[in-house]
Amino acid sequence: MVLATFLACGCHPEGQGVTTQRPIGQVLEEVARQWTSIPGVVAVAQGSHEGRACILVLCTVEPAQLKDRIPSAIEGYQVIVQRTDQIKALD
């Protein structure tokens, strides 16, 4: 009976509920402005890692310098911080 209740609710007996993940675009909209205001961060974009959507953070500083300011995952999406050269707009 208890197992049937968990299954009917879409929950696992371990207490891990099935969650609906928001689209990555919505998550990006919320974090892009905040993260690009961090010194050294030049871009935030959608990427792919091991066949799954991820959030890519490009920076001009060593990624380790941002580990306390940018999480390794947000809302189920892995966050990958990569070093890049300064990005300039083309004329």
Image: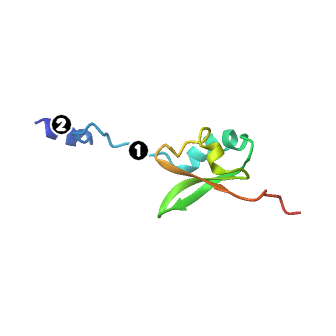
For this view, does 6 lie left or right of residue 48?
A: left
Q: The disc labelled 2 sits on which kind of residue? A: Thr
Comparing 23 with 79, the one in front is 79
What's the residue at 24%, 42% (across, down)? 12
Q: In which quarter of the image is residue 35?
A: top right
Q: Quadrant of residue 34?
A: top right
For this view, does 21 lie left or right of residue 61?
A: left
Q: Is residue 59 above or below residue 50?
A: above
Mark 2 lies on a secondary structure that is: helix
For this view, does 58 lie left or right of residue 17?
A: right
Numbered label attached to residue 58: none
Q: Residue 13's spot in the image, x, y percent?
A: 21, 39
Report the number of discs.
Answer: 2
Q: Which colour scheme is used?
A: rainbow
Numbered label attached to residue 20: 1
What's the residue at 71%, 58% (across, down)? 84
Q: Residue 63's spot in the image, x, y percent?
A: 64, 50
- Does label 2 or label 1 sit earlier along the sequence? 2
Gap between marks 2 and 1 measured at Cα: 20 Å
Q: Residue 91's spot in the image, x, y percent?
A: 89, 63
Which quadrant holds the N terminus?
top left
Residue located beneath label 2 in the image: 5
What's the residue at 56%, 44% (across, down)? 27
Q: In this view, does 3 lie above or below 53?
A: above
Mark 1 lies on a secondary structure that is: loop
Comparing 8 with 69, the one in front is 69
- Circle 1 packing at 10 Å, graded few (<14), some (14-19), many (20+), is few
Q: Is residue 13 above or below residue 63?
A: above
Q: The disc labelled 1 sits on which kind of residue? A: Thr
What's the residue at 76%, 59% (across, down)? 85
